[in-house]
Image: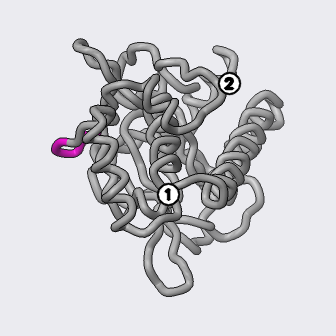
Amino acid sequence: MLSAPARAELLGLGLELTFESGDVLLTEGAADRHLYVILSGFAKVTATVENGQESLLAVRVGGDTVGEMAALDGAPRSAGVVACGPLQARVIGPEALHGLMMRRPEVAMALTRIVADRLRWANRRRLDFRGYTVKVRLARLLVELTVACGRPEPGGGYVIGFQLTQPELAALTGAAETTVHKGLRELRDEGLLGTGYRTTTVHDLARLARVAELAEPVVPPAPRPRRGSVDDRL
């Protein structure tokens, strides 16, 4: 989203930090206001629902920001963020961020676009819950994850390089875990999906998009210089 000068200035702010799997980047309800730019790796965004259980809201990858809402409005964190595997990120304090936004309005516009994109994503999920079967909702989610952060395989197909558990897939698709298990089994039986240790492979993205009832053609991701790298996203 950013021009080369704005991108360089953004990535020159703050400190670069390294996280391991399970490390907490942000805590739900906390009053801190810094923002992270994920440089490489993957993170899960979670929130606690009324019954006290933790629910997965989204997955973020290299080039994504996390913590932008509190950085912009100063309200308590609406969700927590946890690294799912080795992760590098740049942490930027609110004063430095606001100064950059004043100097470079395109940074403010980019953050506004990020918030708008995520609102649209949440609205799509709500509509999917009411309008599609669980299998279709699951296929739509897998297509989105593949296009956003899949790695092309030499023999064909795309690997999603992080593991989502069945309860997490259930949270993202608004379905019961047993129904998600059935939908995954059907997609595997149809040759569309493969699962392994900490990976999910989409064997046929075009067919999966048809199962997902997506009207627009799916553009496969280009080869990536680093897994989940900031080079792919900013």
Q: In the image, is 150 to the left or to the right of 232?
A: left
**Magenta run includes residue 197:** yes
* Left or right of 138 on screen, residue 92: right
Q: Nearer the viewer, residue 206 or 109?
A: 206
Q: Amino acid at mark 2?
A: Met
Residue 142: percent from left, percent from top: 44, 40
> Quadrant where the N terminus lies?
top right
Give the labeled residue for mark 2.
1
Q: Where's residue 91, x and y in %?
A: 52, 46
> Where is residue 118 drawn, in percent x and y?
67, 47
Question: Quadrant of the rendered structure where residue 103 is?
Answer: top right
Query: Residue, x 24% and y 37% (percent of image)?
Result: 194
On the image, numbered disc 1 is attached to which residue? 172
- Residue 15 visible in the picture: no
Frontmost residue, 108 versus 12: 108
Disc 2 and disc 1 in contact, CB within 8 angstroms: no
Question: Which residues make up the magenta segment?
Answer: 196-200
Please, is residue 34 above or below residue 203 in the view?
below
Q: Nearer the viewer, mark 2 or mark 1?
A: 1
Q: Nearer the viewer, residue 19 or 153?
A: 153
Front one among 182 and 154: 182
Classify mark 2: helix, strand or loop: loop
